[in-house]
Amino acid sequence: MRGMDISLSESRIAALRQASAQQVAVEVVAETGSTNADLLARLDNLSSPLLLAAEIQTAGRGRAGRNWHSAAGATLTFSLAWRFQRPLQSLLGLPLAVGVALAEALAALDVPVALKWPNDVLKDGKKLAGILLETVSMPAAMQGGTWAVIGIGLNLTVPDRLEAQIGHMVADARWLARMDRSRLLAALLNALAEALTQFEEGGFKAFMPRWNSLHAHAGQMVLILDHGQLLQQGRAVGADESGCLLLDTAAGRIAVVAGDVSLRIKEN
């Protein structure tokens, strides 16, 4: 990494925006606590989508209040605020659609990945990227709709000290670490903007077969946990049209809603 320019450029990212991403404003900061928290605090004053990227996040968050550990140059961390005209309850499958967009963009960059329900991107069975989606319904006086703030952390290189902070083995993508960082982020933004536009028009239905083709645990026995407590166990089938996980259990097939639950492989 010595001698490599790993900084992000607002102007370069903006210049590489395509199609639906043209409407997205771009901001880059050297350091912040959490790009998701920053965007959530600014929603009342936003009139169009905004991408906020940080060279360093000191208080990054994952699902269920977990910490997201990052380091300058080792990870790519950013959030995208996007306003939907859809009501909040229709966004259930949105994290999965975002996963599809990321997976397809990474595959186009020669980094094949799989998807773990509901919102992790896996490489060689280990976590490469995570998605944190937070939503806010807007009052009619502010033109209604729902803002979604989509936070993404992508591991590029994982030095020993960072893996020690994380506490378990994770994947990285050293090929991406050698890319121009601004070009990489622009490619991900273009894929995300296209997917969010498609989701606005038709919901998760169009993404369902794409997600299921990338499903990391199809046919495997899994456990569904809520803050460590076992809720369900069964054989993972795939996602339905709303983004729920279909699970074949001893009592029959059920649909599991994401919420704050987590999935684990059942050990023999």
Image (cartoon, rainbow, N blue to C red):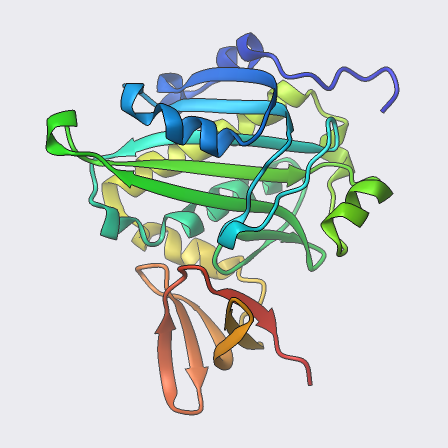
Horizontally, is 233 left or right of 24 in the view? right
- From what the image shows, is residue 204 above or below residue 25? below
- Image side of residue 203 versus residue 152, left or right: left
* Residue drawn at 16 percent across, 26 percent down: 142
Q: Residue at x 76, y 46 (%)?
A: 165
**Is 2 drawn above or below residue 94 in the view shown?**
above
Residue 69 locus on image (x, y percent): 67, 41
Q: Give how far across and how far down residue 32 sits, in percent.
A: 58, 24
Question: Whole-percent x and y of residue 55?
Answer: 65, 23
| Residue situated in front as seen by the camera: 82 or 231 | 231
At x 49%, y 28%, the residue is 189
Quadrant of the drawing holding the C terminus: bottom right
Residue 222 falls in which quadrant of the image? bottom right
| Residue 224 percent across, percent down from the top left | 50, 73
Of all residues, the one furthest to the bottom in this rendering is 250
Q: Is residue 247 above or below residue 15?
A: below
How many marks the image carries: the answer is 0
**Which quadrant of the figure has residue 162?**
top right
Report the side of 90 relative to 128 (left or right): left
Kindly tell me whether residue 170 is visible in this rendering. no
Residue 175 visible in the current orientation: yes
Q: Quadrant of the N terminus?
A: top right
Along the viewing direction, whichever of 63 and 13 lies nearer the viewer? 63
Q: Quadrant of residue 263?
A: bottom right
Q: Is residue 34 left or right of residue 47?
A: right
